[in-house]
Image (cartoon, rainbow, N blue to C red):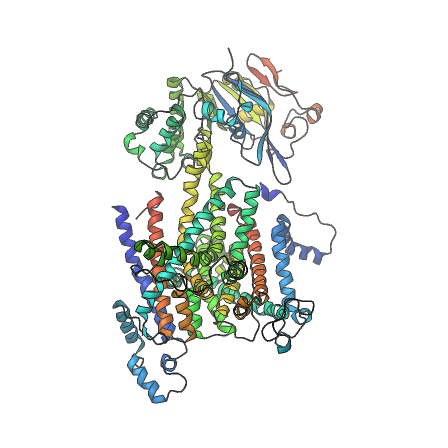
Amino acid sequence: MTTMDDAAPADTGRSWWGARLWGRLEYPAYIIRRNPVTLFGFSVIVLLVIIALAAPLIATHDPLAVSPANALEPPSRQALFGTDQYGRDVFSRIIYATRLDLFIALTSVGLAFAVGTVLGALAGYFAGLADNLLMRLVDVIMAFPPFILAMGTAAALGAGTANIIYVVALIQAPIYVRLARGEILSAKERPYAEAAHTMGNSPLQVIFIHLLPNCVPVLLVQVAVNLSWAILNAAGLSFIGLGVRPPTPEWGGMINEGMAFMLSGHWWLFFFPGLAIVITILAFNLLADGLRDVFDPRLRW
Amino acid sequence: MRLLIYIARRLLLLIPTLLGVTIVCFSLVRVLPGNPAYFILGPYATEEDIEQVKTELGLDKPLYQQYVIYLNDILHGDLGYAWHTSQPVADDLKQRFPLSIELATIALIITLIVGVPLGVVSAVKRGSWVDNVARVLAVTGVSMPMFWTGLVLIYFFFFRLRWAPPPMGVLDVLMERPPTVTGMILVDSIIAGNWETFGSAISHLILPAITLALPMIGSITRMTRSSMAEVLHSDYVRTATAFGLPRRTVIYRDALQNALLPVVTMIGVLYGFALGGTVLIEMIFGLTGMGSYSFGSIMNMDYAGVQGAVLMVAVIFVMINLLVDILYAFIDPRISYG
Amino acid sequence: MTRLLEIRDLKTYFYLRRAVVRAVDGVSFWMDPGEMVGLVGESGSGKSVTALSVLRLIQMPGRIVSGEIFFQGRDLLAMPEAKMNSTVRGQAITMVFQNPRSCLNPVLTVGKQISRVYRTHKGVSTGQANDRSLGLLKLVQIPDPERVMRRYPHQLSGGMCQRVMIAMALICQPQLVIADEPTTGLDVTVQSQILSLMRDLRSQTQAAQLLITHDLGVVAETCDRIVIMYCGKVVETGSVQDVFQQPTHPYTAALLHSVPDVRKDFRTTTIPGTVPDARDPPSGCRFHPRCTACADICRVEEPPLIQIGPSREVACHQRLGG
């Protein structure tokens, strides 16, 4: 009943291309209109992406420029979020770190999504021994508490940005394998899958052109949730010294560095990078809630 | 009887999972780049030294043989030697693990005590101010990185307000530990009847436990709320209402009992989260548990320590999940044990 | 003699984000003690919402907007919630729902669910309530009732679950049982068993029954009187015999024509058009867009429900056979 609340907007004489573009954007626009909190989350994410892209324009200082004379200055007009023990500008470092943290989150989730979904879809469609083995592997990965596994593999691989991406992808991929497999398992029993098959499509075509696109909504909600986890885990790994190496600015690493100066009252060193993490994760979570609301009304809360 | 068969079956299914876990832990050190011999000897070792240590460690044997040896070792309780603490890893873990388990358990208890009622009230009084506050708290809770929340709490409650003890250790500085029975400080204090250490330990553990609990409270509140909301709209709740059962009975018997079933399954997930979180928490609060041990091992490139700790956590996590599944089968009559 | 149930101008609306669904929009009808009345209409005509309104089971975003529901002379809509629970629900008026399996609590045994209704309302011991439950399970012809008492709903068939629901509905000896499409979701053979069981029970228990259905055949077989609803309103009521032999509302006539007649040639006619949207019902008579006898007045003026005989009412400007 509620899905019929919004009728399609009347055609207001846009050009053909305009109409086509509007057709593409209509659904996301509808999602956002439905729920102002989702709109807020979405806007914050857009803002963060802009900050990441335009970091050099927004940052007031060079994030790596050391200035011992100005070390540990409290927040002021010159240094919005104060300076750290080397006199580096905390605000500028946080701005540049946005770049890195979003990049890590997007690439790791992208990697997990791509690998997990493809493997899960193939396993779900073909079943058999390979499917069995894959599911056992997934069970094994999921037998570890995620952060512990991340820590263990990161320790073995060594610190570094690329390794963080692999590690965070590793702990998230099983979720996509399971999701995609489950979706394909139920989708392949439906008549349209049969129809696609009898029309002479190869199994791969059936999976990736006909079945998988229908599972995208469910996966999309998971992507939004996982982006927030990715940021938490990446920052957590950097915090324990297994991620991005100093002096490269990264939120988790900055908190770690700032920790040592907390008990001498220099709170701004650890506080602001954490705030950046909270805002980012909150935005992804709100977006995920909104998407879930639309795609799966059963879970509405 | 059927429940027993079910448990036996689940225990059997555990074997391949545990084997997989050992393979992963084994691989962490051998397959991935990085040579343990090199790490043991340090950067100034000669080629011959490295070869000799490799032979000592059995690293010159084929991988499958190494794995069999490794498996044999851990079955005999030998997890290797941690050179950064100069004692067997197994002994380290024995000393360090109880604290982490204790911390994770306290956090889980706080989570359940706060989160479940909050979710229930939130669902029952949908749209009320309680609901709105609970929802905001929940989504903020799951969005806060605990290594940051912990620092904020220390800053306010120790550095500013001086309400909390300094974030160092689990007891006040000059206090003596009660005799070790379980290794868990609170339990040992109770056994020894030593209320002074009990109180001190509580005051040291409360902030880390709250830090660990906050995100978990967030997720359990959300889970309980959505599950409860769904159940409140179910046909059987309508039936109970239609037959004139008091609203209290309908909500707290019919609805709650059903709504809590999915929440129970989440306990395992949360426990895993808590165990992972202790790594970060212990580091911040100066606690010497499994987390700070893993951290120390990582910092000193002591791979045997990392490997042992990861294996131990995984085994505990698997066991907890098994217990949760059994508990679930016990309380949900719809689970067929077949 | 006071009526058992009298509904006057009941309006129950659902307030959605952008629309108001007038599911029940001015329904009036009555029932006498011990009577069996069929409430008939297409899906979406407001039958179930009417039934739920009687027990005040409408959940947000729905609300009973206005009207009166008298039960043995007391206005149920003015009764405090606590009194509803202690005197009406589960005792004087009970309800049997559709899809019985999902209507029973999955984590409680059948015996517990039946006996707790009795215990709550009669304040008896668990033992007494169990004995009584066992008796009721026998009454609704459940084989091996002792065993069924200890079963969970998922271990029973749909038909069994509906028998359990009926036992629950009868345990406190109600004056009125409302059965909301009690056979929906059951196998065809089981459907007729449940219906004949309900007929038998009526003669044994003296309880009046309001049978909600879209199956005219069922009404013809089991009911004394019929109330026909269309788009949130009552269009025609009367004894089953009168209405079936001489329908006066074009909708009733069309409805009767759409049922295959075994005695003739199975030929049926369908009603042209579709059920109107309850968010924006047609002006005047709600049936007019689909009506074959539609006149100008039907488009603008809503026909009132008028009495045309003893216990015979119709709402139509152009009544047939007039």
Query: Residue B294, position in %: x, y?
Result: 40, 69
Q: Residue at x 52, y 75 (%)?
A: A245
Q: Relative to B88, is A244 on the left or the right?
A: right
> Left or right of C304: which side holds A123?
left
Q: Is residue A225 above or below residue C139?
A: below
Residue drawn at 47 percent across, 38 percent down: B234
Vertical comparison of A149 with C178: above or below = below
| Residue C137 appears in view | yes
Q: Is residue A31 or residue B298 the one in the foreground?
A: B298
Count of all numbered marks drawn on residues in the image: 0
In the foreground, B209 or B316: B209
Q: Find residue C110 and report its image quarter.
A: top left
Q: Residue at x 52, y 28 (%)?
A: C56
Q: Is residue C266 above or below residue A136?
A: above
Towards the viewer: C194 or B176: B176
Above or below: residue B271 compared with residue A262: above
Q: Position of residue C196 (x, y in %)?
A: 39, 24
The location of residue B298, given as percent across then percent down, is: 42, 73
Kindly indicate the quadrant of the structure image that contains residue C274. Answer: top right
Among all residues in the image, which is located at the extreme right?
A: A13
Looking at the picture, how far across and down is residue A143, in whole percent? 38, 61
Can the viewer see residue C216? no
Q: Residue at x 37, y 56 (%)?
A: B196
Return the residue found at the far top.
Answer: C1
